[in-house]
Amino acid sequence: MHKVKASNLTRLIGFVLLGLVLFFVSNRVDELRVYQGASVAMYVVAISSIILLTGYSGQVSLGHGALLAVGGYGAALVRNEFNAPVWLCFAAAVLLAALWGALLGATAARLSGPYLAGTTLALAVGLPSIANQFKFLGGEQGLIFDIGLPPASLGEFFSQYKWFFWIAALTALIAMWWLQNLLRSRYGRTWRAVRSQSVAAELAGINLARSKILAFTVSAGLAGLAGALLSMSISTVSPGAFPLSLSFALATGAVLSGVTTLGGVIIGAVTLVAIPEVADTLTQSIGASENVIANLPGLMVSGLLIVAVLFVPNGPVEQLKHRQKR
Amino acid sequence: MFQLLNTVLIGITAGSIYSLMAIAMVLVWRSTRVVNFAQAGMALLSTYFGYEIIHMSGSYWLALPIAMLAGAAVAAAIELIFMRLLLKHSSQGAIASIAPIIATLGLLGLIKSIIGYFWGNQDVTIDSPFSNVGFTLGSHTLALSPMKLFILLAVVFLTLVLSLIFQKTNLGLALRASAYSPEISRLAGIKVDLVRTFGWSLAGAAGGAAGMLQTANGNGTLSPDSLEFSLLLAFGFIAAVIGGLDSLIGAVLGALLLGLVLAFVLTYVGGSLVFITAFVLLLVVLLIRPGGIISQKAGRRA
């Protein structure tokens, strides 16, 4: 018991140290890197929501882009209607997405494998077109989500992007700390039990449906938070910001990170942010044609996904551990 | 009255194209137990091959069979290169149940990028071989044009051929046996791997036909990001699930039901609700009859 507490404290200190390092780094690098840092923080939250769902609770969702959209719209609506402070917008995003997640989860708990994948995929295809239909969601243009200028006390040279990064990084750190605690708790153990041996778990007194719905709800809440972060960094929320390819990119990120290791999440997040830039550098250095420029990022995402599924199906971290054991 | 008749006609035509996609899904599911989310991408790629043929020879009639052959070849190649590797590498751990889903999604993205590279992301057009102007009955125009009539006949013909292959030939028997129990089929001397490749190529051909017909049925434009193919992907899957992933007849019935329901919603309620209707229909069927509308056993899920 004592040991558990100590390691909990160590992890908390680790997270705080990581936050401090990020804080100092953000003061040293240029604007573009700071902005990319905010994107990485967003992807960390989004991918970890999929890792929680797939790796820990054994469900699969191809429609998390839709849940991100729910969070983004929720945050923007609360901001625009009530002029709420930023943290309240984020809380609203989490709650709204979690509510949708609970509804979806109640259905999802009865489905498995390809059926669940197809249903969530259908949701991701359909949801943006639904957002187009309602006036209060702003149609094709969407809504503005403006969190305002950074506070004046930070000095006049403090840029908007750095403000985004601070908010996103702090949110991601808090979310990750909370999530890794959750996964070590009774709930985390329950989810893993359900994933690996559902019959045995049921015999041990676990309510399968409730456990799966809870996992879906928490995962949706995290996805909503990521959606709010995404909308914050582009200052708007519109159907076009949540295409099917976003859902696929998140699935790719989760597979690259390794679906069973929360710690690997940074690998997937950094890769997703790096791909457009790597593609850009490549196309510029070889002077590629328009078709290549438009399609190289997509090609790299799908190519990585296939390579990862074929050769490191359980993620690089797990693969290394496995090799060391042997 | 005429509106009702036209709605039914539109529903049946759309449904018949979905049914080809649904059949393709069922064939792959029955031969490898994989739901192929790359199906729409494969259909799109075959349609582009068809477009090339039309571009060179000017004949839709030459393009249609060649697109189907191309679809079969692409599908067979995918099965040989990716699916066999996948079954070998990712059959254990937390990923095992979702690896095929993720892999076919990756393939979908890969195919789209490849198409974008060779043909660009702009629209290209295919001219319909028949007129798309509806027949007239008195003073009314029916929603049945020579093109739509051809689509219906083509789909009926292809469905019949595929069901005959599946139900009445030794090859079809081998297909069903390998899906039911690969181990026992191997003992009985069936080359399971080869049979699976064959199942995939049949599905690829059906997908190619669906792509060619869908493009000619719509406004004739084709692009890697076209909504039509996202819809083929989603509706093909929904139709296959409504019918139960295990049954060819079920896939056809599911697709027709989906096409009709969507046509009625489109005519009488409004275009904005089409997608949500399809989604609700899918959920209702999954919750009430998880094995599809014509299944006998209740509760079968994977």
Image (cartoon, helix red, strand yellow):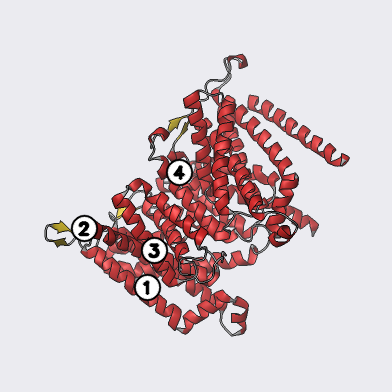
Foreground: disc 3 or disc 2: 2
Q: Nearer the viewer, residue A214 or A263?
A: A214
**Residue occupied by mark 3:** B255
Alpha carbon of mark 3 to alpha carbon of mark 2: how far? Answer: 24 Å
Where is residue A299 shown, x and y percent of the image? 50, 51
Residue A287 numbered tag: 4
Of mark 2 and mark 1, the one earlier in the sequence is 2
Residue B1 numbered tag: 2
Amino acid on which the number 1 mark rests in the picture: Thr
**Residue occupied by mark 1:** B159
Which element type, helix, strand or loop, lies under badge 1? helix
Badge 1: chain ID: B
Callout 3: few (<14), some (14-19), or many (20+) C-alpha neighbours within 10 Å? many
Q: Does residue B169 show up? A: yes
Where is residue B172 shown, x and y percent of the image? 47, 79
Q: Residue at x 61, y 36 (%)?
A: A41
Q: Residue at x 33, y 48 (%)?
A: B271
Amino acid on which the number 3 mark rests in the picture: Ala
Alpha carbon of mark 2 to alpha carbon of mark 1: how far? Answer: 30 Å
Amino acid on which the number 2 mark rests in the picture: Met
Furthest-right residue in this view: A2
Q: Residue at x 54, y 54 (%)?
A: A303
Which element type, helix, strand or loop, lies under badge 4? loop
